[in-house]
Amino acid sequence: MIGRRALWIAGPPLAAALAFATPGAAAAAVIDTASASGGGDYWSDVDIHAQTGPDGRGLAGRITFHFGILHFSEPVRCLRVTGPDRGDGTASAPTTAILYAGPSRTAATDVAIELVDNGGSGADEMNLEPVASIPPRCTAPASFLLNSTLTHGRAVVFDAP
């Protein structure tokens, strides 16, 4: 009887501890992310935050920046991250995010944005291409019209393992 009572008393804390130790709990937190701040040749006031599961579910985020006198601020409509599947990018192993957003009142078209995480130190990139529509599977356009290094800022792209 004492053994059952001790198990009953320890039961809820023990169950809670076991719940945090399960592999499923850790796997649920794995997400691809892309963020950028600062500015560069074409951009100022860059504020980009996006995330999604590696399977494309759970998309959330917003793209905001100034291009000259134009202000762009729209929700992310898709995000695709590629890289070495081990986290942030480096100069020798960059991690890249393709994001689509729009259309907005100031840009009457959708835009594709490429963020390249080269490890910082003025080497990260933000590139933009106006597009007619968002392609299936959030694939990158063939080229980008505006290519810029984030000279004062940072792009951080995390490719979930």
Image (spheres, grey):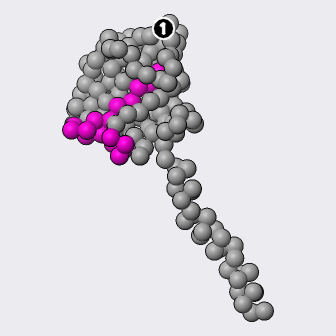
In the rendered structure, the answer to whether residue 135 lies left or right of residue 90 reads right
Asked whether, in this view, residue 85 is left or right of residue 93, the answer is right
Q: Main secondary structure of the magenta part?
A: loop
Judging depth in this view, the residue of 23 and 73 nearest the camera is 23
Q: Is residue 158 above or below residue 18?
A: above
Residue occupying the far bottom of the picture: 2
Q: Is residue 102 visible in the rendered structure shown here?
A: yes
- Which span is picked out in magenta? 84-101
Reply yes or no: does residue 90 show up in magenta: yes
Residue at 54% from the left image edge and 59% from the top image edge: 23
Q: Position of residue 36 (x, y in %)?
A: 37, 32
Residue for point 45% across, 39% down: 32
Percent coordinates x, y for residue 70 in the rendering: 42, 11
Asked if the magenta segment contains residue 103, the reply would be: no
Residue 43 appears in which quarter of the rendering? top left
- Element assignment for label 1: loop
At label 1, counting other C-alpha atoms closer than 10 Å, the crowd grade (few under 14, some 14-19, many 20 or more) is few
Q: Which residue is mark 1?
A: 132
Q: Residue at x 36, y 24 (%)?
A: 114
The residue shown at (35%, 31%) is 96
Query: Mark 1: which amino acid?
Result: Ala
Q: Quadrant of the N terminus?
A: bottom right
Vertical relation: 128 (above or below) 46: above
Whether residue 7 is situated above or below residue 44 in the rendered picture: below
Image coordinates for residue 131, horizontal then vertical, percent: 44, 10
Q: How many marks?
A: 1
- Does residue 85 lie above or below 126 as drawn? below
Tell me residue 94's x, y (percent).
28, 35
